[in-house]
Image (cartoon, helix red, strand yellow):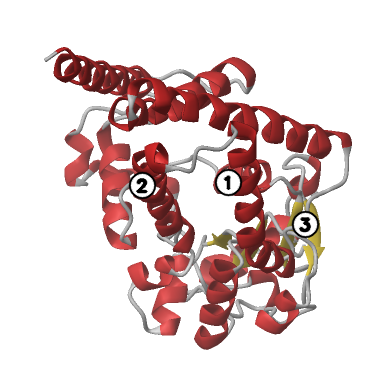
Amino acid sequence: MPDPSGAAIKAACTHWLSQHVPVPVGERLRGLASSPHAALEPDVYGKGGAVAVLEARTAELLGKPAAVFVAKGMTAQLCSLRAHIEARGTTDVAIHPQSHLDVDEAGAIERVGGAAAIRLGRYRPFGVAELQAVTDRLAAVVIELPLRRSGYLLPPLGELKAISAHCRDHRIPLHFDGARLWEAAAAYGVPLADLAALAAIQVNAGDISFAAALFVFGLYSALMPKRPKINPLSLISFTTGAGAVMLIPLVGWEISGGDVLKSDTLTISTVVFVVIFPSTMAYLFFNRGIELIGPNRAAPFFHLVPVFGSAMAILLLGEKPELFHLVGYALVLAGIFTASRRGSSRTRT
């Protein structure tokens, strides 16, 4: 009677595509027992032991600062995509219709991960042209390397680099479903770290702009005592108006990348809150503080922004408080106290 599982045929195979030749369980266990890592202490819920060795070696090969072992790859991928969805504020995820995330997991990417799949391509891996045609704001772009259901096809390396550049330019997370990343790197003829770097989060213009903004705000504080003697509301109106005009090109750039605000109650309420409190009221109070105690003593209080921001995230968003929060709070408060004391001493002298 024919074996529907094909076990006999599989057992006779000597070469396998995209996996190791199967071995009996006993032989596998004996091989593990002879490993030099078998003498290590067992891990405790994924911490320490051979798991730590595996994570360190994987991080080294992929050129990453760290790696984490997850028993089920699909679980790790759903968690990663869910994090991108929440961070980007949209559920749309670009994915190939033959991706095993879509085909082999009973719709888990949508039913469990909460994604709205935008399926690109048919059988061959999709390219940057199909991705550029998507007008929706994307939470992530998923590429399976290689595309197993289509016969282990890989996109051309140049096309993969173009997709990576497109995602980086539009600030879209690029997610590699890399169950066969080692084989993909061998097929491309590139080091693992170079392939993994295509999906890396890198320092971008936004990070540089933020650092520049900190410098400009310090300059703003230092020059505030030299401002024209005008009504505080007039000063706020001029500075916010000038800022709005300067932001027009950046708004156009964001809209061209698909980042469009939704006209719903939450968005409108957020805009109203930002206009009244972090903008108008905060600047009125800060400018008044500079008048009373001078820029050198007032400027350090700007570092309370991340303190209040993280505290509100803990109270309102369920952020888990960690030791580094307390250390950061202590350093910021110590710096403010030191700057204020030194300023007071010079004033009394």
Residue tagged 1: 80
Would residue 9 be found to the left or right of residue 332 on screen?
right
In the image, which disc is placed on residue 120? none
> How many numbered callouts?
3
Q: Is residue 121 visible?
A: yes
Image depth: mark 3 or mark 2 in front: 2
Residue farthest to the left, as pictured: 349
Q: Position of residue 205 (x, y in %)?
A: 46, 63
Compare marks 3 and 2 and give the one earlier in the sequence. Answer: 2
Residue tagged 3: 260
Compare marks 1 and 2 and give the one earlier in the sequence. Answer: 1
Amino acid type of disc 3? Val
Q: Position of residue 32 (x, y in %)?
A: 29, 45
Quarter of the picture holding the C terminus: top left
Amino acid type of disc 1? Ser
10 Å crowding of disc 3: few (<14), some (14-19), many (20+)? few
Quarter of the picture holding the N terminus: bottom right
Cα distance, mark 3 to mark 1? Answer: 24 Å
Can you tell which quarter of the image residue 135 is in?
A: bottom right
